Image (cartoon, grey):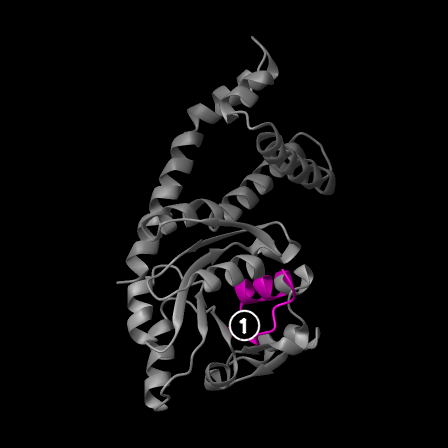
Amino acid sequence: MANIQEKVGFIGGGEMAYAVAMGMLAGGLVKPDQMCVSNPSSGKLERFKEVKISTTHDNMEIWKSCDIIVLCVKPQVYPAVVKEIHDSKFDGRSCLVLSVMAGIDSARMEKDFSWARVIRTMPNTPCLVKAGVFLYCKSKTSTDKDMDVTKSLLSSCSECILLPEHLLGAATAISGCGVAYFFTAMDALADGAVKMGVPRATALRLAALTLVGSGQMHLQTGSHPGVLKDAVTSPGGVTICALHALDKGGFRAALIDAVEAASKKSTDLGK
């Protein structure tokens, strides 16, 4: 697809906004002079300025000037954003709103932004290095063209996966929150290696490369994780002893519980 001609604005300049914005730039479909970011904190905006993206403290500037608006505020801040629009007497303008907020469903946003088309999305931070996942779902107001533009824009920095909205929370508990699970696993694996005498930097690199390589093996072979696990688990060997230790520690159950807890919390945020 050719370069996106529309102006893209971000309301919120936190970690997720930065990851998505940098991913879009890296993908080459959007240029810095087509982007603008709003945030109350000047410090948060400095890194956007460094790559020549315009910034503002005024959210209404984004609403009034941008064609594609990425809502990157925390769900708890969302009511204040809506109130700001209503208090300003802004009567709206045709635009596409991409939400990356957990828990705020499309129906609520369609009501709050009646003049706009809404697409609910959920990225993860590896978008920053063009290795992310972007979940997205169609709403009643979004057009087929909106969906195509969204996929083109987001796939420049991630793999885009279309889902029905009722599954977005559970899927986010893997792709969004899962980044933290894997970083925690990396840290723990490195600690284990350090305990056994491996230098910290080497231990972390081994953990990171092993996680990346394991994921690529599944993606490229299509084999079930259980099959790939069994391939490195010899009878009476080292790996089966390690897996036994993980099972005694409730490793699998803890991961299942984590996904369930995150999915439920995501739903609660919208209430």
| Front residue of 236 and 80 | 80
The spot of residue 233 in percent (x, y) is 57, 16
Q: Can you identify the residue that label 1 sits on?
A: 13
Does residue 91 lie above or below 269 as drawn? below
Left or right of 48: which side holds 58?
left
Residue found at x 65% / y 40%? 208
The spot of residue 21 in percent (x, y) is 60, 66
The spot of residue 259 in percent (x, y) is 39, 42
Q: Residue pushed farthest left?
A: 271
Residue found at x 37% / y 84%? 85
Does residue 156 lie above or below 214 as drawn? below
Q: What residue range appears in magenta? A: 1-23
User: Label 1 sits on what residue type?
Assistant: Gly
Residue found at x 36% / y 69%? 76
Label 1 secondary element: loop
Q: Please check the rendered image and state whether residue 15 is part of the magenta-colored stretch, yes or no.
A: yes
Quadrant of the image containing the N terminus:
bottom right
Quadrant of the image containing the C terminus:
bottom left
Q: Please check the rendered image and state whether residue 262 is part of the magenta-colored stretch, yes or no.
A: no
* Residue 53 visible in this rendered orientation of the protein: no
| Front residue of 96 and 209 | 96
Q: Residues within 10 Å of mark 1 (few under 14, many from 20)?
A: many
Left or right of 2: which side holds 64?
left
